[in-house]
Structures are given as C-alpha cells and as structure tokens.
C-alpha cells in the first residue's frame, strides 16, 4: 500500500557544503527520514515533458492531473518509509521553487552553502585522496591541471559546482525566496547544536537531542561508481577542522568573490540564514 507523503521538506544548495552531514544528523531523529541526494527530482523532470507539449498524449493532462502524477512519484518512492517527516535531498530542487510551492505549499527548501573557494578546494582534496581513480564529476577526464578542473567544475550549465551555484542564485532572488532556509557549512560544523535547533525552529518542528559525537552516514557503492570513494562518508564527530587550502592561492582568491549570500545588501528578499 502506498502512503501519501504529506509532510516533506527539501535539502538542496551547493555541493560539498554539508547536505550529507545534515542528513546524517537529522536521521538520528526517529520521526524523520533523510539521506543523500535521491532520484525523485530527476524522475519528476523526466515525466514532465510527456505531460506537456513534448508528449503526444499531453492533451490528456491538466494541471491537477500533473500535480497528482508528481505527488504519485513521491508517494511511491517513499512508500516503505514510516517517518512522519521526510527530507528529500537533491540540488535540483532549488531550481524548482515554483514547482515545490505548487506540490507542497507548506514545505521549505534547506540550502546548504559554503564559500565557493572551499568547495573547489574540497573537490580537489577528494581527487588527491583517490589518485588512481577518474571521477564522473569531471567527465572522467585525464591530464587536466587544477585550473582546467576548476573551470570544468564552475561551468554554469553542467559543472558540478557552477550549475548548483546558478540554481541557488535563481532561488535566492526569486519570488519564492521566502521558502529558503540557508545553512552555512561553517555554522553547522562549528555550532551544530545551535544550528540544528534553529533549523527545527524555522521548520516549526519539535527539537530533538542529537548526538553530534556519533553521526553516521556512508554510501560506498555510490561513491565507488562515480570514481570518488569517500565522497559521502561522514565523520562520526561533528567538528570544525582547520587546514590549509590545497589549491593555488590565486584560484582561492578568484572564487572568493562569488559568496553573494554573505552580503546583506544582496539579501533583497530577506532569506533566512541560520
């Protein structure tokens, strides 16, 4: 029997910015279900053209039926999940704020963010940890320099970082920006209890006593398939770790100008940052 998903929020934002860590924390709460990026957003995208002008049967659909079809994907995918509250993770949701509002009007989109320079550096660090692998994140390319790799990552249409940054900017400045809850990575790892409590408050949920010394999450099969073992492995203890960047200083400085959410004058819609 398929259960109707009624209470759901979405986790999106930028890569390497704490979304998997946040899911690992939230799933400690027996009332909630959270995981790494899942397929529901892409499944919705795949059927939409067939229900619109691109499909020969598009005349058989109106908006009410389209909405029912989309919700049917959620209901089927989460049919075996008994949690009262579901967090569906995919960085595509921030580009679909209007669709989210139409399907689940009470839902929020949690956007995990991090300084772009550190995201580029984090990807490079992961590559250095797996020198015998080639990553799908870079199209399995060989022989590129760190400058080539960073350009590839930051490409606005297909880049691992760039397409997410474009989506986040779109959501931030959109008329649905009030649906966003932005969680900076530094806040989550430096003050996890305070940050998660503020998240529960912003969601209107009852707080839960999390154990930030024993957070567990890993997806080894998925990470191996994309050529980046350890990408989604979460360390048990939530803490901030000081380290030096591994990318050249000029690259680090180059991407430091892209952190628009840190500038109050850019927060035209009053997006909540916790």
Image (spheres, rainbow, N blue to C red):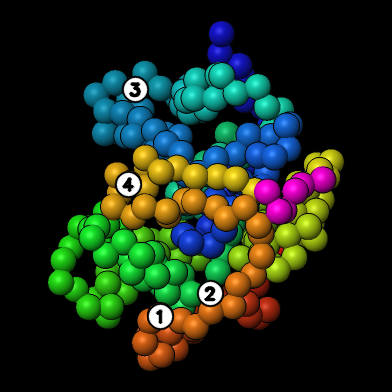
Q: State the CA–CA distance, disc 2 to disc 3.
A: 45 Å
Rounded to the nearest angstrom, the CA distance separating label 1 from label 3 is 54 Å
Can you identify the residue that label 1 sits on?
A: 246
State the image coordinates of residue 154 (x, y, percent, origin top left): 35, 70
| Secondary element at tag 1 | loop
- Return the residue found at the far top: 1
**In the picture, which quadrant includes the C terminus?**
bottom right
Left or right of 63? Residue 123 is left
* First reached walking from the N terminus: tag 4 or tag 2: 2
Residue 59 - label: 3
Mark before the other along the chain sequence, 2 or 3? 3
Magenta residues (range): 209-214
| Rendered residue at 37%/47% (across/down) | 223
- The number of numbered discs placed on residues in the rendered structure image is 4
- Mark 1: few/some/many CA within 10 Å (<14, 14-19, 20+): some
**Circle 4 residue:** 224
Counting from the top left corner in percent of width and height, residue 94 is at 51, 53
The CA span between labels 3 and 4 is 43 Å
Q: Do labels 1 and 3 touch, CB within 8 Å?
A: no
N-term-proximal mark, 1 vs 3: 3
Between disc 3 and disc 4, the foreground one is: 4
Residue 123 position by quadrant: bottom left
Q: Is residue 213 magenta?
A: yes
Other residues around mark 2 within 10 Å, as few (<14) / some (14–19) / many (≥20): many
129 left or right of 265 in image: left
Q: Is residue 217 above or below residue 128?
A: above
Q: Which residue is mark 2?
A: 115
């Amino acid at each position: 029997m398929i259960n109707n998903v009624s209470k759901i929020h979405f986790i999106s934002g930028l890569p390497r910015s704490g979304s998997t860590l946040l899911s690992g924390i939230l799933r400690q709460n027996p009332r909630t279900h959270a995981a790494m990026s899942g397929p529901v957003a892409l499944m919705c995208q795949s059927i939409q053209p067939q229900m619109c002008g691109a499909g020969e049967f598009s005349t058989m659909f109106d908006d009410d039926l389209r909405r029912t079809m989309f919700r049917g994907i959620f209901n089927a995918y989460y049919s075996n999940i008994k949690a009262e509250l579901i967090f569906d993770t995919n960085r595509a949701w921030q580009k679909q704020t209007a669709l989210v509002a139409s399907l689940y009007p009470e839902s929020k989109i949690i956007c995990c963010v991090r300084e772009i320079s550190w995201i580029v550096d984090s990807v490079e660090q992961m590559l250095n940890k797996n020198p015998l692998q080639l990553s799908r994140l870079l199209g399995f390319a060989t022989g590129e320099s760190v400058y080539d790799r960073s350009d590839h990552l930051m490409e606005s249409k297909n880049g691992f970082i760039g397409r997410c940054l474009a989506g986040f900017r779109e959501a931030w400045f959109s008329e649905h920006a009030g649906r966003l809850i932005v969680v900076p990575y530094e806040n989550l790892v430096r003050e996890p209890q305070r940050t998660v409590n503020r998240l529960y408050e912003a969601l209107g949920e009852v707080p839960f006593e999390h154990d930030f010394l024993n957070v567990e999450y890993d997806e080894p099969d998925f990470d191996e398939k994309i050529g980046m073992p350890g990408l989604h492995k979460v360390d048990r203890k939530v803490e901030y770790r000081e380290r030096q960047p591994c990318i050249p200083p000029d690259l680090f400085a180059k991407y430091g100008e892209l952190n628009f959410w840190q500038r109050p004058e850019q927060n035209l819609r009053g997006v909540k940052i916790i």
